[in-house]
Image (tube, coloured by chain):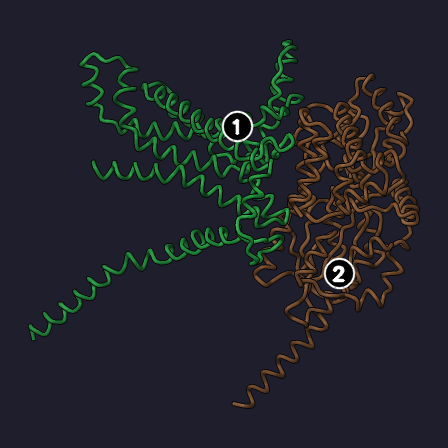
């Protein structure tokens, strides 16, 4: 009776040591379309080159909403994946619930704190320990414009909101929709936050949209930002209801519209239409204060039930930060690498501009987390912002003062 | 020897009887157990969650009726509840009216009835996502109906309900009626075929006009069909989610939000699980408030027959 038991133990040990060589990592992600899927495949190939097994757990749709729903059900049933695509304060939320595991072993050894800008590094940590690896940095407050239309009308990229409205008036007079937009709450919020920084400034944005200060949410700067936001509606076409963002980008591509306020993932649409930055389309930061709103994609690492799989998890974290993947992924996605030491030689001018502004903003403290993309606040507060902003934007009966009051109340109720 | 055999077959008989008595219960047991856990168990779980402060994941910190009070002050919830009344009421009424009318017309022994029936029933074969997307294009002022009519020369024509926050909820009714009225027609048509022709002949002999025959004799015979149609339509209305997601996305603003979309957004994407649960419980309450008295009266009257 004793001998078989010992045999079994030996077999188990052998299996465990064998697994240390080829461990498995289950990766929950929502990179299912085009370039993103290709970038995920590169990561998979790199991991397999190191002898580990990548178990793909892709959940398509809804900008990750479906993936988050699946993740929650897996976590509640006590069987979370090894790594999941989570970003922003959601990382802290999962961390506080005790689901995430430290990857300091890799992060400290590889000196992530030297490689990452502080704002990005802080997003990856819970209680001072790294629990997530950043994939890239998106800039949200971009304006995309049709170069041909701008050239024909002799327009220059506006640097203030007054200039912006002057340009928009000229476009309107020429019979072109000045601003392409899709009437979905996250797109409304994307435009609003560009206005909020541009007009209210960096401190206002941080106090209102990040720190959620009640007096600032109700204050005169908020009312002013809301008024400008609403004014933009008169420069959009009325058919925008429930239009997808890429359809709106299409309007800029084919010259039906002059500009669009959208994050740098819009570049993918221009690229697939065969257009080039600088000659066919222009990119310039949203007018006003020199600030950079960021949206950082990342992978959070979950506590494993089988310790034998740990090497694969750590290898994944290291590979995500490896320059070849950082470069390949950002080229596919339109973003810039999260690591500041990756060369941008293969990138276009918009990405180079993005890096330059990023570094400048990091110096001056104008690097701000995006509210519309879930980096500034948790999802409940983000939802409160979305509801009030989209209602105010679409309903002309609500004044900016009322909306500011509603905003403060909704944020308080959601917290 | 004979008595032994008789006794044996008697025992066999008894065993078979017992098996026969137990068999239905055995066969039904799994589905009863599944229903108990996955329907009533989860209703109970949702109700319990609605009294907690659960955010991202369930937690059991009970806070009483706080989530319900939050709902009562939540403007988006009030809009959603009001929309359900508008959408549900109109959808059921219009579907029934069109369905009955089509069924009666098709019942007049016309040519190509089979083909017509298939044409009217066909939309039911589509999912609401397809219906919603198609109507999103048809109703979009810059793409669909309005542009078509304007291009035909009627430049004054406007039909912009889809982008008008006050009217957008009616576009949901249009699309849903288009999809479901053929199904109601099929149900009533089947019912009409089941009405005893002798009844109609007798009424004709008495000199009743055709509309009068339908109104006073045939349609009252179809009470059970009406009951089934109402049940099916009202649950389609209450659980409408995909149609809103595809057609309007809840917009403009949140003007076309329904309780189901509200519940999903809060429970699953916004990390406000308790608030979402509370809205789900209120939805269940609304369904029960409609269904229970109705079921009760229908089932009781049947027993009297």
Question: Is B95 left, or right, of A341 in this rendering?
Answer: left
Residue drawn 38% across the image and 29% down it: B186
Whole-percent x, y for residue A353 in the image: 91, 42
Q: Residue furthest left?
A: B2
How packed is label 2: few (under 14 Cα within 10 Å), some, or many (20 or more)? Answer: many
Please tell me whether mark 2 sits on a helix, a strand or a loop: strand
Q: Is residue B242 left or right of residue A395?
A: left
The image quarter in which residue A27 lies? bottom right
Q: Is residue B255 left or right of residue A312?
A: left
Q: Nearer the viewer, mark 1 or mark 2?
A: 2
Where is residue B147? Give x, y as percent. Answer: 65, 17
Look at mark 2 in the image and give the residue it sits on.
A126
Q: Secondary structure at mark 1?
A: helix
The chain carrying label 2 is A
The answer to whether B91 is drawn above or below residue A364 in the figure is above
Mark-to-mark CA distance, 1 and 2: 48 Å
| Residue A410 point in image, percent of width and height | 66, 40
Q: Nearer the viewer, residue A413 or B277?
A: A413
- Which chain is green in the picture? B
- Residue A404's place in the image compared with A86, above or below, is above
* Residue A279: percent from left, percent from top: 89, 32
Image chain in brown:
A
């Amino acid at each position: 009776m004793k001998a078989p038991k010992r045999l079994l133990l030996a077999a188990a040990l052998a299996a465990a040591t064998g697994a240390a060589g080829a461990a498995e990592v289950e990766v929950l992600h929502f990179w299912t379309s085009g370039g993103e899927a290709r970038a995920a495949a590169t990561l998979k190939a790199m991991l397999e080159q190191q002898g580990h097994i990548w178990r793909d757990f892709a959940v398509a749709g809804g900008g990750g909403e479906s993936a988050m729903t699946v993740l929650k059900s897996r976590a509640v049933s006590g069987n979370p994946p090894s790594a999941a695509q989570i970003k922003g304060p959601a990382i802290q939320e999962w961390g506080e619930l005790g689901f995430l595991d430290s990857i300091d072993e890799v992060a400290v050894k590889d000196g992530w704190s030297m490689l990452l800008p502080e704002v990005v590094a802080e997003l990856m940590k819970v209680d001072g320990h790294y629990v997530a690896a950043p994939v890239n940095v998106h800039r949200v407050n971009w304006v995309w414009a049709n170069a041909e239309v701008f050239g024909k009308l002799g327009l220059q990229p506006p640097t203030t909101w007054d200039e912006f409205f002057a340009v928009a008036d000229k476009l309107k007079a020429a019979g072109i929709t000045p601003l392409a937009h899709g009437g979905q709450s996250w797109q409304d919020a994307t435009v609003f936050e560009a206005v909020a920084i541009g007009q209210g400034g960096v401190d206002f944005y941080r106090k209102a949209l990040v720190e959620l200060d009640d007096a600032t949410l109700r204050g005169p700067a908020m009312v002013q930002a809301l008024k400008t936001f609403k004014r933009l509606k008169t420069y959009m076409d009325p058919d925008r209801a429930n239009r997808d963002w890429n359809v709106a980008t299409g309007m800029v591509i084919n010259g039906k519209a002059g500009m669009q306020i959208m994050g740098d993932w819009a570049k993918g649409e221009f690229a697939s239409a065969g257009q080039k930055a600088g000659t066919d389309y222009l990119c310039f930061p949203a007018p006003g204060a020199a600030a950079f709103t960021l949206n950082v994609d990342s992978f959070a690492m979950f506590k494993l039930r089988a310790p034998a799989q740990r090497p694969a998890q750590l290898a994944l974290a290291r590979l995500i930060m490896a320059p070849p993947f950082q470069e390949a992924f950002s080229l596919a996605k339109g973003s810039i690498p999260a690591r500041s030491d990756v060369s941008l030689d293969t990138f276009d001018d918009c990405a180079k501009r993005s890096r330059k502004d990023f570094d400048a903003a990091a110096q001056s403290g104008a690097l701000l987390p995006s509210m519309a993309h879930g980096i500034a606040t948790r999802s409940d507060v983000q939802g409160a912002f979305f509801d009030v902003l989209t209602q105010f934007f679409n309903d002309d009966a609500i004044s900016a003062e009322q909306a500011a009051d509603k905003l403060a109340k909704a944020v308080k109720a959601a917290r | 020897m004979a008595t032994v055999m008789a006794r044996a077959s008697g025992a066999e008989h008894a065993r078979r009887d017992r098996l026969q008595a137990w068999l239905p219960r055995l066969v039904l047991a799994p589905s009863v157990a599944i229903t108990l856990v996955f329907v009533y168990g989860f209703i109970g779980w949702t109700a319990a969650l609605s009294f907690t402060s659960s955010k991202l994941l369930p937690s059991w910190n009970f806070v009483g009726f706080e989530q319900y009070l939050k709902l009562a002050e939540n403007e988006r919830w009030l809009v959603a509840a009001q929309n359900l009344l508008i959408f549900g009421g109109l959808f059921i009424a219009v579907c029934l009216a069109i369905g009955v009318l089509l069924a009666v017309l098709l019942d007049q022994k016309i040519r190509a009835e089979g083909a017509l029936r298939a044409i009217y029933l066909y939309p039911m074969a589509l999912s609401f996502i397809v219906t919603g997307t198609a109507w999103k294009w048809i109703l979009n002022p810059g793409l669909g109906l309005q542009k078509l009519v304007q291009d035909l020369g009627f430049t004054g024509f406007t039909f912009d309900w889809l982008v008008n926050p006050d009217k957008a909820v009616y576009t949901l009714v249009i699309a849903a009626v288009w999809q479901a009225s053929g199904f109601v027609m099929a149900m009533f048509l089947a019912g009409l075929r089941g009405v005893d022709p002798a009844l109609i002949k007798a009424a004709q002999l008495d000199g009743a006009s055709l509309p009068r025959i339908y109104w006073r004799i045939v349609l009252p015979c179809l009470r059970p069909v009406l009951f089934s149609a109402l049940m099916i339509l009202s649950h389609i209305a209450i659980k409408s989610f995909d149609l809103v997601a595809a057609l309007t996305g809840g917009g403009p603003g949140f003007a076309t939000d329904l309780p189901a979309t509200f519940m999903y957004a809060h429970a699953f994407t916004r990390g406000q699980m308790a608030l979402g649960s509370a809205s789900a419980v209120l939805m269940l309450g609304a369904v029960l408030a409609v269904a229970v008295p109705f079921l009760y009266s229908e089932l009781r009257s049947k027993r009297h027959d």
